[in-house]
Structures are given as structure tokens and as C-alpha cells.
Image (tube, rainbow, N blue to C red):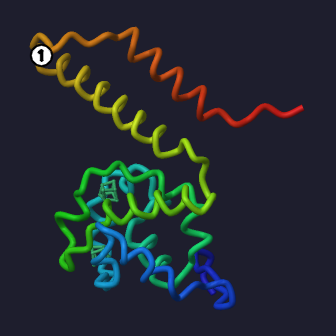
């Protein structure tokens, strides 16, 4: 066995998992995936962090690795840019599937109840930061003034909420 190969115990697999997900709006095309890997090849997050691979996550879902998927930090790494969805030959909408997986993860207690709201805050912060950088890059006055102090405050709030709990 190669170092990067994983052993999957069939006793812990949930064959209903993919169907339960596919019954929710947005995840209907899930079972059409044929593991071509195009999504991973076009993913900007995978480019920066090779441990994140949408095609691998889809495969884990199709195999029924419910607990592993719902408890994985990887499901929170998707930047919802939809590159994978635009490029998928099978019209599998991976970003929408991740949205559904995140909802189920919270519903079933694998992630804290406030995780979805925190992710929305991170996305909003990312967009504000992107706008600030673009305004500087293009040397044009911003359409709306950007409050840099607010940006820093938001970053501190997010990082504070994401800090691991203190022990002792
Ligand atoms: S591009 Fe589509 S078919 Fe190919 S691995 Fe990704 S989700 Fe599956
Ligand atoms: S939507 Fe998520 S998985 Fe798809 S390309 Fe963008 S970051 Fe990657």
C-alpha cells in the first residue's frame, strides 16, 4: 500500500448519505460525479493547499463516509467561487453541495451552531478586503469609502471567535 492510500472500513460507511444529501436543493447532481478530477484542477483553494480536493470530498460522500465528511475541516475551506461548477462535465454543482454539507454538519452537531453565521461574516470580510486591494491596485477612488478601522476590527473579531478555547 502506498503512503497516501487510506484504509476505509465498510462497517462505518453510510450508504444512505449521498441520497440524503442529494434530496436537498442544490445537491441533486451529486451522484453524477465520475471522479474526473476537473474540479480539483480548477480550484484556487486546492492550488494553495493541496490537502483540499473537491473531487476527493465528492468521492468520500459517494462512498458513504458520513462522519468523516461532516466532521472534516475541509468542508469549511471552499471559497464558493463556483470555478468547479462551471468546469464540471457532469454538471455537479460542488459549491452548492458544500453548502448543503455544511448545513447538515451543523444540524447533526458536527459543527457549532454559529458556524454558518461566522462563515458568512468571513465571506463578507473577504469581499471587503478584495475591494480595498482592487481600489488600491486600480488607483481609483472607491465607489463607497472603505472603513479600514472596521476591516481591522472585523478581522480581530473573527480571529477572536476562531481562537481555540483556553484550557486550565
Ligand atoms: S469535475 Fe465534476 S465529475 Fe469531475 S470529479 Fe469534479 S464533481 Fe466529479
Ligand atoms: S467553489 Fe470551492 S471547491 Fe469549487 S473551485 Fe471554488 S473554492 Fe474550489
Residue 106 lies left or right of residue 12; in this view the side is left
Residue 15 lies left or right of residue 1; in this view the side is left
Tell me: residue 107, above or below residue 163: below
* Quadrant position of the N terminus in the picture: bottom right
Total label count? 1
Q: Position of residue 27 (x, y in %)?
A: 33, 71
The answer to which image quadrant residue 10 occupies is: bottom right
Tell me: residue 113, above or below residue 72: above
Residue 12 lies left or right of residue 138; in this view the side is right
Helix, strand or loop for disc 1 = loop
**Under 8 Å from ligand 2: the CB of mark 1?**
no
Q: Position of residue 148 (x, y in %)?
A: 35, 11
Tell me: residue 3, above or below residue 151: below
Q: Residue at x 67, y 84 (%)?
A: 12
Tell me: residue 149, above or below residue 49: above
Q: Position of residue 119 (x, y in %)?
A: 44, 41
* Quadrant position of the C terminus in the picture: top right
Q: Residue at x 40, y 49 (%)?
A: 48
- Residue at numbered disc 1: 143
Q: Residue at x 44, y 73 (%)?
A: 56
Q: Position of residue 37 (x, y in %)?
A: 32, 74
Residue 27 lies left or right of residue 13; in this view the side is left
Question: 38 and 164: which one is in front?
Answer: 164
Amino acid at each position: 500500500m502506498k503512503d497516501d492510500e487510506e484504509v476505509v472500513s465498510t462497517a462505518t460507511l453510510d450508504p444512505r448519505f449521498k441520497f440524503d444529501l442529494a434530496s436537498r436543493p442544490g445537491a441533486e447532481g451529486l451522484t453524477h460525479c465520475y471522479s474526473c478530477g476537473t474540479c480539483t484542477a480548477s480550484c484556487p483553494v486546492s492550488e494553495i493547499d493541496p490537502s483540499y480536493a473537491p473531487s476527493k470530498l465528492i468521492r468520500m460522500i459517494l462512498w458513504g463516509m458520513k462522519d468523516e465528511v461532516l466532521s472534516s475541516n475541509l468542508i469549511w475551506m471552499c471559497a464558493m467561487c463556483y470555478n468547479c461548477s462551471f468546469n464540471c462535465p457532469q454538471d455537479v454543482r460542488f459549491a452548492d453541495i458544500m453548502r448543503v454539507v455544511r448545513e447538515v454538519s451543523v444540524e447533526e452537531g458536527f459543527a457549532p451552531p454559529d458556524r454558518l453565521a461566522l462563515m458568512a461574516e468571513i465571506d463578507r470580510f473577504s469581499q471587503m478586503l478584495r475591494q480595498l486591494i482592487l481600489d488600491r491596485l486600480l488607483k481609483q477612488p472607491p465607489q463607497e469609502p472603505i472603513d479600514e478601522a472596521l476591516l481591522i476590527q472585523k478581522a480581530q473579531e473573527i480571529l477572536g471567535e476562531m481562537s481555540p478555547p483556553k484550557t486550565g
